[in-house]
Image (cartoon, grey):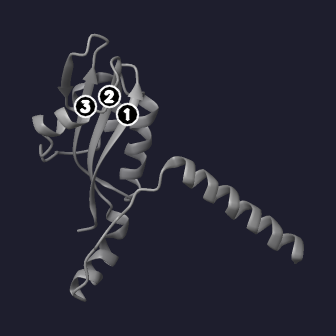
């Protein structure tokens, strides 16, 4: 099994856009991730919190058609934690995913007695800075060639 991660994706409004769900389904179909569980958490404009399963929404039927059974591992405590990050009138899509693209490497690392000692998410603004620096370096290298 590859690395497993719980992600909380936050969106404005009380509905996750179909295009976001479709993009996740595309990753799953391509074998990049395996969806273990999902949960939609909504915080109404008045601050009331509700939860539902991703497959309960008809508008996502096409995107979720091939997802298969989920393990129902995300529960009320997880939803409460996600809800605490939400502004009123917004929602979150919680995903428990296996990074199946890394399964073979993870297996080899475990067989060699290794383990993940730390993992750090890089903030979006730093990713953008890194992307710009990389593009600048590529352009500079092309000019030298």
Left or right, 44 with reference to 80:
right
Label 2 with label 3: CB-CB less than 8 Å: yes
Residue at mark 3: 84
Q: Could one spot residue 109 in this view of the protein? A: yes
Residue drawn where x is 17% and y is 45% of the image: 70
Q: Secondary structure at mark 2?
A: loop
Left or right, 67 with reference to 79:
right
Quarter location, residue 10 = top left
For label 1, count other residues whose C-alpha is less than 10 Å away and answer few (under 14), some (14-19) or many (20+): many
Q: Secondary structure at mark 3?
A: loop
Quarter location, residue 90 = top left
Residue drawn where x is 28% and y is 67% of the image: 2
Q: Position of residue 33 (x, y in %)?
A: 34, 56
Vertical position of residue 67 compared to residue 19: above or below: below
- Mark number displayed over residue 10: 1
- Mark number displayed over residue 86: 2
């Amino acid at each position: 099994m590859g690395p497993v991660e719980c992600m909380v994706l936050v969106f404005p409004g009380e509905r996750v856009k179909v295009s976001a769900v479709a993009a996740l389904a595309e990753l799953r179909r391509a074998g990049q991730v395996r969806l273990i569980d999902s949960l939609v958490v909504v915080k109404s404009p008045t601050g009331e919190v509700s939860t539902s399963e991703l497959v309960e929404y008809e508008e996502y039927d096409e995107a979720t058609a091939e997802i298969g059974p989920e393990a129902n591992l995300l529960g009320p405590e997880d939803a409460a934690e996600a809800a605490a990050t939400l502004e009123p009138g917004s929602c979150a899509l919680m995903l428990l995913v296996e990074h199946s693209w890394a399964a073979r490497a993870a297996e080899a690392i475990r067989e060699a007695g290794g383990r993940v000692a730390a993992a750090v998410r890089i903030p979006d603004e730093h990713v953008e800075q890194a992307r710009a620096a990389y593009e600048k370096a590529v352009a500079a290298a092309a000019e030298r060639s």
